[in-house]
Image (tube, grey):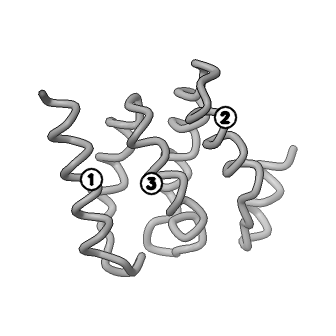
Amino acid sequence: SIRQFVVKTVNDYLVQKKQVDNMTRNFVKFLCTTCGYKEIRQLAVARLDNFLNSTKLSRPSQDLLSYLAANTRTGSTEDLEVVQKLAQLRIKSKPLANFYTL
């Protein structure tokens, strides 16, 4: 199915590109459009801290954070893990930290 193909593609790309500097903005935008799948949300939130602290990916990763927050509504154990990881984010940029802590 399409879901399995998307999850496999994202997982393969994240395994292949271990460093955030090698990620592209288009890939982060692709994560935004596919984070309706719980598997993608789990994979994306694991890298979100690094995405947010990257200067190259800061704007698309802010969008990803918004999409992740909007799509974690089911109350499943996977979504609770995503919310827990979102609460543990360490944002180093002061303006960004001020924006999300208000």
Residue type for callout 3: Pro
Look at the image and tell me in which quarter the C terminus lies. top right
Q: Is mark 2 on a helix, strand or loop?
A: helix
**On the picture, is 18 further left or further right than 62?**
left
Q: In this view, does 76 lie above or below 32?
A: above
Q: Which of marks 1 and 3 is in front?
A: 1
Residue wearing tag 2: 80
| Few, some or many residues within 10 Å of mark 2 (<14, 14–19, 20+) | some
- Quarter of the image holding residue 49? bottom right
- Quarter of the image holding residue 34? top left
What residue lies at 50% left-to-right and 57% top-to-bottom? 59
| Few, some or many residues within 10 Å of mark 3 (<14, 14–19, 20+) | many
What residue lies at 56% left-to-right and 35% top-to-bottom? 78
Q: Nearer the viewer, mark 1 or mark 2?
A: 2
Q: Where is residue 2 in the image (x, y as percent from the top left)?
A: 14, 30
Mark 1 and 3 residues: CB-CB less than 8 Å, in contact? no
How many numbered circles does the render carry? 3
**On the picture, is 92 further left or further right than 102?**
left
Q: Is residue 48 above or below residue 38?
A: below
Residue wearing tag 3: 60
Task: Give whichever of 61, 20 is nearer the camera.
Answer: 20
Residue type for callout 2: Leu
Q: Residue 10 carries which label?
A: 1
Q: Which of marks 2 and 3 is in front?
A: 2
CA separation, marks 1 and 3? 16 Å
CA separation, marks 2 and 3? 23 Å
**On the picture, is 14 further left or further right than 48?**
left
**Of label 1 and label 2, which has the lower sequence position?**
1
Residue type for callout 1: Val
**Of label 1 and label 3, which has the lower sequence position?**
1
Mark 2 and 3 residues: CB-CB less than 8 Å, in contact? no
**On the picture, is 97 further left or further right than 3?**
right
